[in-house]
Image (cartoon, rainbow, N blue to C red):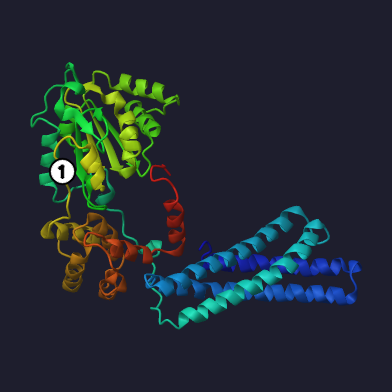
C-alpha cells in the first residue's frame, strides 16, 4: 500500500480543487452542450467527487482489516481473501493517484477553457466513474467476507518517534556471542599463527601436488584450487557474522596480505564473482568484460600474495553443470601462495559436501545462557537486568521459541525494545503465529511477527527490496 492516511487527505484536498475547476469548465463551455447535457455533466462531476470521497474514507478501514488478517494469513481462506483485498486496495490507490496527476496536469498546462479539461471531461469522468464504482463494490464485498472471520483488533505499528537510538549492535566491530569455539576452529584450520609473524614472500604451492587442495564436485572432475574451509549452518544462525569476525581478527589481518570478500547469494555467476574479486583486490570496478581477461587480471593481482577469499552465502547453483561453473571460477587459484585459503559459508549440505577440503565448521544455535544475554542486549539495550521482573519473565518464555537463532533474537528483540509494556510483550508471546507448522530449526514465526509490526509503507518497501538482488548496494 503506497498511500498513508496523510496522503489520502492530501489527495482529497487536491481533488476538491480539481472538481471545482471541472464544474467551472463545464459552465464556461456551455455553448458546446444543451442545458440538459450541461446539467448531466455537472451531476456526473458531483457523483464522481462523492464516490472518490467515499473511497478515500474507506481505505483506512481496509488497512486495519489487512493488518488484522495478516495475523491469520497462514489460514488458506484468509490468505486468499487477503491477497485479493491487497490487490483491490492497490487499485484504489492508483485511482487516487490518477486524480492527483490530472490535478497537476491541469494546473501546469491550462485553465478551464483549454484542452486539459476537455481531456478530463472525456476520459476521467466517463472512464473513472465506472472504475470507482467497481473498486468500491469489490472492497465492500471483501470487507463483509473478512469481518465475519473474527480477526484480531488492529495491531499497534511503531512510529519513528518511539524507536530506540541505534545501539552498538550496528557498529562495524560487532561483539560476537558464544562463538569462541568456532573462532578457534576456523583460525586453526586456516593455520593462522598464535603470534603474528612478519609477512614474507614464499614460493608458490601447486595445488596439483597437494591432496589437501584437491576438490571434487558431485563426482565430477578434480578441481585444482586452494584449500577450502566451509562454515555451515541453517539460515540466521550467524555464519556471516562469524566470517566477518574472522576477517576483522587482528591475527587474520596480520597473517593474510589480501582478504577478498564476495557475497554470492543464489546467483553463482563466475564472471560476476571474478569481477567482484578484482574489485575487492583493487578497490576499483573492473573495466574489462572478457571472462578470460578477467581471470588473468585476477591471477595477476593475487600473484605473490598470501590471500584469504571469503565466499559468503553459497547455494546449490554453485554446483550446476556438474561443477563446471565452480571449476571455472576456481581456475585462477590453481597455483596459489602457500598458506592461502578459501572460506565458504553455506546453508546447503550439498555445497558443504562438494567443495570442502577440510573438516567443515558447523555453526549451531547459541546456548541458553549466552542466548539470553544476547536477547537482553537486543530487547533492553544492554546485557544487564531489565529492572522489570515481569518483562524478564515474559522474555524467558519467548526465548525457547527463537531456537537459539541470533537473527530471530535480533529481529524480535528490537521489536520488543520499541515498547516495554508488559501487555505488548504478552501479545507477542501469545501470538497465533508461533503455531505455524515448521521444521525444528526454522524461525519463520519470529520473522513473521517482526513483519506484522512494520508500518504499511515499510511493508511495501520490503516487498520491493525482496525483488532486488541481495548484492545490490542501495
Residue occupying the point 40% across, 79% down: 151
Q: Residue at x 58, y 75 (%)?
A: 138
Q: Whole-percent x and y of residue 42?
A: 79, 74
Measured as percent of width and height from the top left, residue 316 is found at: 31, 44
Residue at image location 66% in from the left, 58% down from the top: 101
* Total number of numbered discs in the rendering: 1
Residue 409, image quadrant = bottom left
Mark yes or no: residue 453 visible.
no
Question: SS at mark 1?
Answer: strand
Horizontal side of residue 326 vs 389, given as left or right: right
Q: Nearer the viewer, residue 86 or 253?
A: 86
Viewer-nearest residue: 31 or 268: 268
Q: Is residue 292 visible?
A: yes
Given residues 134 and 2, the one toward you in this image is 134
Farthest-out residue, front: 219
Q: Nearer the viewer, residue 66 or 59?
A: 66
The quarter of the image holding the C terminus is: top left
Image position of 424 with respect to 260: above or below:
below
The image position of residue 96, as x and y in percent, is 62, 65
Q: Quadrant of residue 443?
A: bottom left
Q: Position of residue 45 (x, y in %)?
A: 75, 72
- Residue on which the image places disc 1: 361
Report the residue at 26% width, 55% height from top: 407
Where on the picture, by quarter, is residue 32? bottom right
Left or right: 39 with respect to 147? right
> Circle 1: is it few (<14), some (14-19), or many (20+) Cα within 10 Å?
many
Amino acid at each position: 500500500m503506497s498511500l498513508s492516511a496523510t496522503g489520502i487527505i492530501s489527495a482529497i484536498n487536491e481533488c476538491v480543487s480539481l472538481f471545482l475547476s471541472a464544474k467551472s469548465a463545464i459552465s464556461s463551455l456551455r455553448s458546446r452542450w444543451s442545458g440538459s447535457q450541461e446539467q448531466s455533466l455537472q451531476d456526473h462531476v458531483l457523483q464522481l467527487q462523492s464516490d472518490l470521497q467515499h473511497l478515500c474514507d474507506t481505505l483506512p478501514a481496509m488497512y486495519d482489516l489487512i493488518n488484522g488478517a495478516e495475523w491469520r494469513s497462514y489460514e488458506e481462506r484468509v490468505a486468499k481473501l487477503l491477497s485479493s483485498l491487497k490487490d483491490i486496495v492497490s487499485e484504489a490507490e492508483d485511482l487516487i493517484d490518477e486524480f492527483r496527476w490530472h490535478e497537476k496536469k491541469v494546473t501546469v498546462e491550462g485553465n478551464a477553457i483549454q484542452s486539459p479539461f476537455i481531456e478530463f471531461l472525456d476520459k476521467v469522468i466517463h472512464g473513472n466513474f465506472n472504475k470507482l464504482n467497481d473498486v468500491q463494490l469489490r472492497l465492500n464485498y471483501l470487507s463483509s467476507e473478512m469481518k465475519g472471520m473474527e480477526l484480531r483488533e488492529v495491531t499497534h505499528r511503531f512510529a519513528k518517534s518511539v524507536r530506540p537510538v541505534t545501539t552498538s549492535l550496528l557498529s562495524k566491530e560487532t561483539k560476537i556471542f558464544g562463538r569462541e569455539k568456532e573462532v578457534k576452529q576456523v583460525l586453526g584450520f586456516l593455520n593462522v599463527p598464535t603470534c603474528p609473524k612478519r609477512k614474507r614472500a614464499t614460493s608458490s604451492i601447486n595445488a596439483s601436488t597437494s591432496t589437501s587442495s584437491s576438490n571434487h564436485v558431485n563426482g565430477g572432475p578434480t578441481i585444482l584450487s586452494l584449500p577450502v574451509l566451509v562454515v555451515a549452518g541453517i539460515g540466521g544462525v550467524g555464519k556471516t557474522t562469524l566470517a566477518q569476525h574472522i576477517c576483522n581478527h587482528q591475527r587474520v589481518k596480520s597473517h593474510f596480505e589480501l582478504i577478498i570478500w564476495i557475497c554470492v547469494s543464489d546467483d553463482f555467476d563466475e564472471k560476476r564473482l571474478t569481477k567482484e574479486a578484482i574489485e575487492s583486490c583493487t578497490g576499483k570496478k573492473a573495466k574489462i568484460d572478457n571472462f578470460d581477461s578477467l581471470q588473468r587480471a585476477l591471477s595477476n593481482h593475487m600473484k605473490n600474495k598470501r590471500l584469504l577469499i571469503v565466499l559468503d552465502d553459497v547455494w546449490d547453483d554453485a554446483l550446476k553443470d556438474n561443477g563446471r561453473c565452480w571449476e571455472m571460477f576456481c581456475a585462477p587459484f590453481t597455483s596459489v601462495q602457500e598458506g592461502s585459503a578459501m572460506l565458504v559459508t553455506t546453508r546447503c549440505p550439498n555445497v558443504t559436501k562438494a567443495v570442502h577440503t577440510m573438516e567443515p565448521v558447523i555453526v549451531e544455535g547459541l546456548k541458553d545462557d549466552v542466548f539470553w544475554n544476547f536477547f537482553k542486549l537486543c530487547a533492553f539495550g544492554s546485557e544487564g537486568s531489565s529492572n522489570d521482573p515481569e518483562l524478564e519473565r515474559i522474555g524467558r518464555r519467548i526465548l525457547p521459541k527463537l531456537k537459539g537463532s541470533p537473527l530471530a533474537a535480533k529481529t524480535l528483540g528490537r521489536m520488543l525494545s520499541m515498547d516495554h509494556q508488559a501487555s505488548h510483550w504478552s501479545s507477542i508471546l501469545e501470538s497465533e503465529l508461533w503455531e505455524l507448522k515448521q521444521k525444528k530449526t526454522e524461525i519463520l514465526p519470529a520473522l513473521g511477527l517482526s513483519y506484522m509490526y512494520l508500518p504499511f509503507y515499510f511493508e511495501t518497501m520490503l516487498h520491493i527490496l525482496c525483488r532486488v538482488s541481495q548484492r545490490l548496494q542501495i
